[in-house]
Amino acid sequence: GDGDEETCPLCFCPADDAYELVACGHVFCRECLEGQFQGAHLQVEAPALPLTCVAEGCGAAVAWGDVVALASPAALSFMKRCAVAAHVLASAGSLRVCPQPG
């Protein structure tokens, strides 16, 4: 209210090109969130899924629509593969990854 700008929980500056997460309403700089998703793609190990809001005390799962809107194509593809692998691993053997045809 009162024209105050939201503070980005990642850089602690007024949110530049503000982006509001669907699940929790926290506002971030668009560039900060894009960097966070790119960072998930560049990790040696699979990112912790689901991605969560890093605002203090939040931890809400980031909506897939937010990821699609902000992640690079390479990061999005990587996160999709990681999500499938995590789901299969969590299934306690009831699911398996099928080899590609051919």
Image (cartoon, helix red, strand yellow):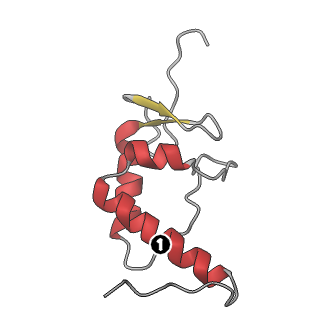
Q: Is residue 14 left or right of residue 21?
A: left
Residue 14 vertical placement versus 8 (above, below): above
Q: Residue at image x 66%, y 50%?
A: 60
Residue 47 in view? no
Residue reaching furthest to the front: 102
Quadrant where the N terminus is found in the figure: top right
Q: Nearer the viewer, residue 102 or 14?
A: 102
- Residue 5 spot, x, y in % from top left: 50, 21
Residue 39 vertical placement versus 45 (above, below): above
List the residue tagged with mark 1: 82
Residue type, numbered disc 1: Cys
- Residue 50 spot, x, y in % from top left: 59, 61
Residue 40 in view? yes
Q: Residue at image x 60%, y 46%?
A: 55
Q: Residue at image x 53%, y 16%?
A: 4
- Neighbours of disc 1 within 10 Å: few (<14), some (14-19), many (20+): some
Q: Residue at image x 51%, y 84%?
A: 97
Q: Is residue 49 left or right of residue 82?
A: right
